[in-house]
């Protein structure tokens, strides 16, 4: 158990819909990362937050957005969903985000029908 | 942009066999290099890392050496166990000594048979 929790574990929805994925980092970790793992694209970094502020952006679509709240939990919002958004979404956390190990949660599996 | 290429799987070995999973990278500057492992139904776990050229990362019998001249970071283990069955990902961070903005390879699935 990494100490990072993600909810829900599974999510099934329809094209055009909007969903919110939630992540609670390890206790004391200030930095949160989101990743997407799909069969065709592999594992891709989406976005990083540090202590409530966006720190780095990767291959995140404009239809996706994220935020980190004062209690340090983070949410990833996916809107206008397409079939190709079906994937496993991982959250990871680290102490400050510079040199420390990232600890990954178990992921949320999203299926868009 | 930065990229990581690792050998296509799946790889199937017998217990106690020698393992090599090849990984090469393309990056500007001086990246840090990582191997992550993903067991079935779980998130990724850091297996080992190296932050500069000629560094050797090691953990649980696995080793990898950061070779700048060949831009490689091959994973090796002398004697695999059934419990090593998992998917292995090679990754880089563009920042020397850093762990941010990880770029991952496609992953190599390893199955070890008793």
Image (cartoon, rainbow, N blue to C red):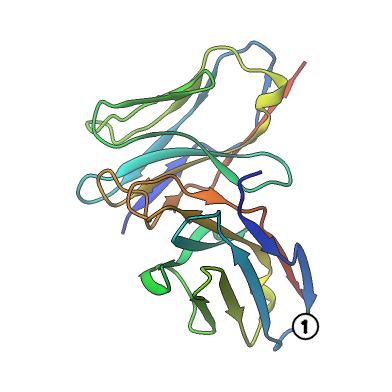
In the depicted view, which residue is nearer to us: B102 or B46? B46
B73 lies above or below B95:
above
In the depicted view, which residue is nearer to us: A57 or B4? A57
Give how far across and how far down residue B104 sits, in percent: 46, 50
Asked which quadrant contains residue A86, the reply is bottom right
In the depicted view, which residue is nearer to us: B110 or B57? B57
Quarter containing the C terminus of chain A? bottom right
What is the secondary structure assignment of the residue under circle 1? loop
Horizontal side of B44 relative to B26 (left or right) equals right
Please give the name of the residue rendered at 64% of the width and 70% of the height, measured from the top-left corner: A22
Asked which quadrant contains residue B53, the reply is top left
B64 lies above or below A29:
above
A33 lies above or below B49:
below
Please give the name of the residue rendered at 59% of the width and 12% of the height, measured from the top-left corner: B79
Q: Visible in this render: residue A113?
A: no
Give how far across and how far down residue B101 sits, in percent: 38, 58
Give how far across and how far down residue A1 sits, in percent: 66, 43
Q: Chain of mark 1?
A: A
Horizontal side of B56 relative to A108 (left or right) equals left
Q: Which residue is mark 1?
A: A14
Q: Residues within 10 Å of mark 1 (few under 14, many from 20)?
A: few
């Amino acid at each position: 158990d990494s100490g990072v929790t993600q909810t829900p574990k599974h999510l099934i929805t329809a094209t055009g819909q909007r969903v919110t994925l939630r992540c609670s980092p390890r206790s004391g970790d200030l930095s949160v990362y989101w990743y997407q793992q799909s069969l065709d694209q592999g594992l891709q970094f989406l976005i990083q937050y540090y202590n409530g502020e966006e720190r780095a952006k990767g291959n995140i679509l404009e239809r996706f957005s994220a935020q980190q709240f004062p209690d340090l939990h983070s949410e990833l919002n996916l809107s206008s969903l397409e079939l190709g958004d079906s994937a496993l979404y991982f959250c990871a956390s680290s102490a400050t985000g510079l040199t420390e190990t990232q600890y990954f949660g178990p992921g949320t599996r999203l299926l868009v029908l | 942009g930065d990229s990581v290429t690792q050998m296509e799987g799946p790889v199937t070995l017998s217990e106690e066999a020698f393992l090599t999973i090849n990984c090469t990278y393309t990056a500007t500057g001086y990246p840090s290099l990582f191997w992550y492992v993903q067991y079935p139904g779980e998130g990724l776990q850091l297996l080992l890392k190296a932050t500069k050229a000629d560094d050797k990362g090691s953990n649980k019998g696995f080793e990898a050496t950061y070779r700048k001249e060949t831009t490689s970071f091959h994973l090796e283990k002398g004697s695999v166990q059934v419990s090593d069955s998992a998917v292995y990902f090679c990754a880089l961070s563009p920042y020397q000594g850093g762990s941010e903005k990880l770029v991952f390879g496609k992953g190599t699935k390893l199955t070890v048979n008793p």
